[in-house]
Amino acid sequence: MTPQNYRSLFSGLDVPVPLLNGKQQVYINLDNAASTPPLKAVGEAIDRFIPYYSSVHRGTGFKSQLSTHAYESARRKVLEFLGARDDEHTCIFGKNTTEMINRLAKRFPFTPERDMVIVSLMEHHSNDLPWRGVAKVLRVGLLSDGRLNEDHFDSLLEQYGSRVALVAISGASNVTGYLNPIHRLAEKAHRVGAQIMVDAAQLAPHRAIAMGVLDDPAHLDYVVLSAHKMYAPFGTGALVGRKDTFSRGEPDHRGGGQVEFVTEDEVEWTGAPERDEAGSPNTIGAVVLAAAMSQLERVGMDEVARHEAELTAYALEKLNAIPWVRLFGDRDPARASERLGVLPMQIEGVPHFLVAAVLGYEFGIGVRSGCFCAHPYLLHLLEVSPADAERVRKRILKGDRREMPGMIRASFGLYNTPEEIDAFVEALAAIRRGDYEGVYYQDVATGEYRPENYSIRFEDYFTFES
């Protein structure tokens, strides 16, 4: 299937957006590491399911029974997609990856003897901050190019192994696209009696994941992911983890649907996964996540990876030839298959906030700018000194984000094309030359740039009225 064929699998790719000059242009989305557009298969699944939507679990009506069937079928699809076994693992649905990691942090069975979590300096805040409140956190250092320092990981296990309860690591970086050797790290963690959780928010849309059986030394104990990064909106996250962990202990959220029996004085909690799914679930969110996974399987995860590697190699060749573009991470097109299509960069002489603004307002290209919810990683890559970091922190606390360090990030999805990369590179060149129309001012509170005397009537594009 060609890139153009892949575009036919998606909704909304040919929708024009307004530009500063009054014209309209088909939007180019290079911000897939944040959220992705929906697959048509997702909308079709909604259309088929909506007429039957009802309450799930314990309802005796036909629609309730069918909704329960759809919801539980989605749970089985997630387990299948991740190569998990339903006799060893369970799938818990929630809002997103962030909530799922927080759920695990509150439910993980730490003990006084094993009270440490190993994370890395490349983690998204979602896989850093939740652990700070429940355990002693050890951080794996990075190499100069931003890759995980596995020798340091080994030394932490050697020094603290008897106290390490969990390794919590990104499967792939949302900043540099680096792929971590998760199964090798898992084997090392298990060797000292620890478990491993993989934050697969970035990894799952791009690579096949096999959690494995629990008696395999390289198995993954927990994997978390988000639907909105897998071409399925509606705000669903999934935590697939060891059934023995979630079949005991008390849930962190309490309410209906998670109990066997309640008196004024006693509560008998139900088993996994219902124990950790208080209240009415996001049934449609689970259904569309499963629909997106099914579509990705029809394309083939190997084919997804191949297509992305071609795009990444093409983009790297183009950007490497430009002296005023500073790329971070692995710049070698020959190794494009060993990473994700996530390209962080700076444009010499132009603030990252301004680059992103002009791309959006004048070229109809969506990218991300800033620190990508990974401040420690960005400070490392940008070689920001502790003194400079402290100066920026103090200014931010005073409400001034204009000097926030950062980069712009282009990230690719299954539907992106070489032609879109060409348009992106040409737009960067125009911005570097100052060849754009608007006069931009910087908002003190956000650091973002906006064009003067320009506003968009969003009501012309969407309202709640049909």
Image (cartoon, grey):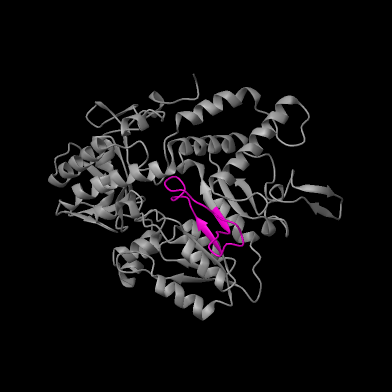
Residue 190, percent across and down? 56, 68
Query: Which secondary structure is most common in the magenta stretch?
Result: loop
User: Which quadrant of the figure has residue 153?
Assistant: bottom left
Residue 83, percent across and down? 55, 49
User: Which quadrant of the figure has residue 390?
Assistant: bottom left
Q: Quadrant of the N terminus?
A: top left
User: Which quadrant of the figure has residue 256?
Assistant: top right
- Residue in the picture at 29% in, 67% down: 383
In magenta, the rendered stretch is 196-223
Instruction: Determine if the magenta segment contains residue 204.
Output: yes
Residue lying farthest to the bottom in this orientation: 159
In the displayed structure, 371 sits above or below 462; it is below
The residue nearer to you, when weighing 271 against 276, is 271
The residue nearer to you, when weighing 444 against 76, is 76
Residue lying farthest to the front in this orientation: 216
Residue 436 seen anywhere in this rendered image of the structure: yes
Instruction: Determine if the magenta segment contains residue 253.
Output: no
Residue 367, percent across and down? 32, 44
